[in-house]
Image (tube, rainbow, N blue to C red):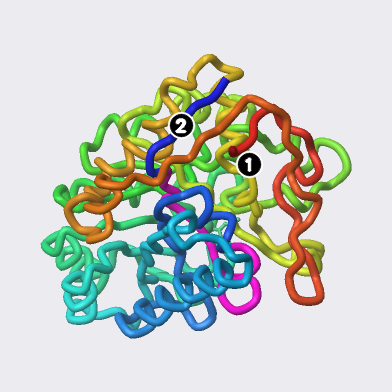
Amino acid sequence: MQITLKNPLDMHLHLRDGAMLDAVAPFSAKSFVAAVIMPNLTPPIDSLESAKAYKQSIVDSIHSYAKAHKQPLESLAFEPLCALYITDSLTPKVLESCANSGFKLLKLYPKGATTNSDNGIAQVMDSKMRALFSVAQDQGMILCIHGESGGFVLEREMEFGVVLRELATSFPRLKIIVEHLSDHRTIPLLEEYDNLYATLTLHHITLDLNDVAGGMLCHHHFCKPVLKTPKDKQALLELALNAHKKVSFGSDSAPHSLESKQKGAAGIFSAPALLPQLAELFDKHNALHNLQAFVSDNAMRIYELACWVEAAKSWEKSPKLITLEKSPSKIPESIPCLDSSLRPLRAGEMIAWREV
Ligand code: DOR
Ligand code: ZN
């Protein structure tokens, strides 16, 4: 059995920089036509100059890989959609210049919520932030949010709902994306507010807190927001399997070296073999017919990619077609990176599908 996906999109991806970028970017470039690239680098990507430079470094990294491995560039055609980190130095003027240059995505981290969020925002609804959101709304920008409070770890997303409600009602023309939805209690907000959307990761729809702390502690499954209850997992899985019109796929693949993981860094590196795992999951639940919408069509529509991403016009003419086949493949044990390595989600496991 085979299925061919047209223009897969990963709407939440950490590619890092330097050697780690070189090690991880080819996985995404092979399987996806574009991805939303997270800006939580050191220093953060919070200006037009740094966004342009970061985008170029991703393109250069993929080109170098193609050259070194004698692979045709078309097979690695990949558009990095770099998001801007909302820091204290991001002014309305900077926002306008970014939007005019085609950088339409904003990423809001509450201060201290996750990896490299020290430059995030302490008061999300203060007057300075409201002024920014107002400009973002007028410029047709999209606000991607790490939606967690600083409270008890299992209640953080639910508690952040107050902010989401206020944002959604105060800026009704601003599209707001609740990133890596993790709690079933957030789902009704998607139904309630027209301008509220979400991304779903593979790990939040397939794993729960037992996979982190139910047996021996598994730091490879530690991420933010933390994996929650089986009930949460099931509710999120259903959104994905039905390709609910308010959700799109965003892997939140977040590589950390083994040493950093051992020290407690949050993040799951899922980029190797994402599409085969999604095909396996959707097949198991007789939902393969919804995979195209979940990994591409919904995002094209929600983010209006055809309107503001120049390259999207050519994706339509010569789409990136990824064929997946129901035949076993093995997820790599580890990916070398400098003098360390990265451990992918389900490292070393056999799965039922593979990318042709
Ligand atoms: O688990 C996570 N890792 N969640 C985030 O929000 C950030 C990410 C990272 O950058 O490592
Ligand atoms: Zn992330």
Measuring 53% from the left and 53% from the top, which residue is drawn there? 30
Residue tagged 1: 227
Percent of width and height locating residue 147: 44, 52
What's the residue type where badge 2 is placed? Thr
Q: Give the range drawn in magenta.
A: 8-24
The quadrant in which the N terminus is found is top right
Q: Does the magenta stretch include residue 66?
A: no
What is the tally of numbered marks visible in this picture? 2
Left or right: residue 203 compared with residue 306: right
Left or right: residue 95 compared with residue 274: left
Label 2 residue SS: strand
Residue tagged 2: 4
Measuring 32% from the left and 36% from the top, which residue is drawn there? 297
Q: Can residue 158 be seen in this view?
A: no
Percent of width and height locating residue 74: 43, 57
Indicate the quadrant where residue 242 lies.
top left
Ligand 1's quadrant is bottom right
Q: Which of marks 1 and 2 is nearer the N terminus?
A: 2
